[in-house]
Image (tube, grey):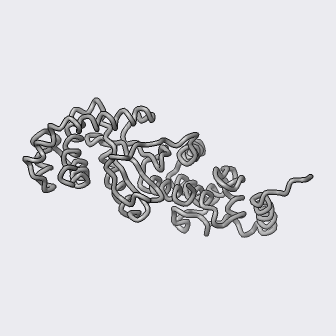
Amino acid sequence: MRRKPEPWRLALAAALVCAAAAGAEGFAWDRVVGIDVGSLTADQKARVDTLAGSTANYHGCRGSVTECLAADPADPTARRLAGFLARRVVAGDTDAQIAEGVANRRRSAHPARPAELDLFEAHCRGPEDAAVTLVEFGDYECPYCRNAESFVERVVDARSDTLRFCFKQFPVRSHERAVPAALAALASAAQERFWEMHRALYVASDLSDSGLEGVARAVGLELERYRAALTDEALTEEIAADKLEGQELGVDRTPTFFVNGKRYFGALTEVELADRIDEEREVP
């Protein structure tokens, strides 16, 4: 008995027939998200068109980006992948660099097995039932973490109703003040000032003991309670547990992000991190 064709195959076949009959209409630019397509030059659009025709959609529709946009105007993966191609073309990436970027997107969205992160006592903000949980393994002395902090805050704040953000300590051995800074952040949690201290540490220019105390004073901590909390062995154990968990998950640099347990690979920019989070919300 002949098997009934799957619905997506029928839709894709119909779309391809329509596309062939109406080829003059060109690429479905109105379906692209993540970039102002009106800002692209004719040459850039032509290159995106070519790339979209040869780049496989990695979720749902099993065709090229061009084919899947034609088959389903609302296909979230195809729309976001088209936007990614356009952004990389505008950035001047080579075809090889773009192919690597697409591979990183696929790897980020569909790992062999998402990580199971322990968030029971983690420092998190946002709804517990959020559709997406973003976890960062970070180091307060790390320059890359510091550079990312400002846009990570914007990404999180813009999605406060749908995104939960958790931070785990991962002090790098070569950063002498990373552990004292991590202890300062955890000590502030006893006074319900963890996130205030977290933000302040990332912009602090002095992470010496006196500098950390100055940050604690600036965020409104009672200094005697803060000093007492710093001596709590449980904080040192928490840092060690966070770092061990990260190492077991393959974390080898900071910052490292996980989106619903899926490690983020690729360029660490505001646009790309936000796009990965939004893609996860749309296509879990």
Q: Which image quarter: residue 69?
A: bottom right
Q: Nearer the viewer, residue 169 or 64?
A: 169
Q: Residue furthest left?
A: 224
Q: For this view, does 274 lie left or right of residue 122?
A: right
Q: For this view, does 32 lie left or right of residue 69?
A: left
Q: Which image quarter: residue 4?
A: bottom right
Q: Residue furthest right?
A: 1
Q: Residue furthest top?
A: 173
Residue at horizontal 64%, vertical 62%?
75
Q: Is residue 266 visible?
A: no
Residue at horizontal 36%, vertical 39%?
254
Name the quarter where the C terminus is drawn.
bottom right
Q: Nearer the viewer, residue 169 or 151?
A: 169
Q: Position of residue 64 (x, y in %)?
A: 70, 53
Q: For this view, does 195 lie left or right of residue 284?
A: left
Q: Is residue 59 visible?
A: yes
Residue at horizontal 27%, vertical 34%?
237
| Image: 115 above or below 220 | above
Q: Nearer the viewer, residue 34 or 230?
A: 230
Q: For this view, does 180 lie left or right of residue 150?
A: left
Q: How many marks?
A: 0
Q: Position of residue 262 (x, y in %)?
A: 50, 45
Q: Position of residue 54 (x, y in %)?
A: 69, 50
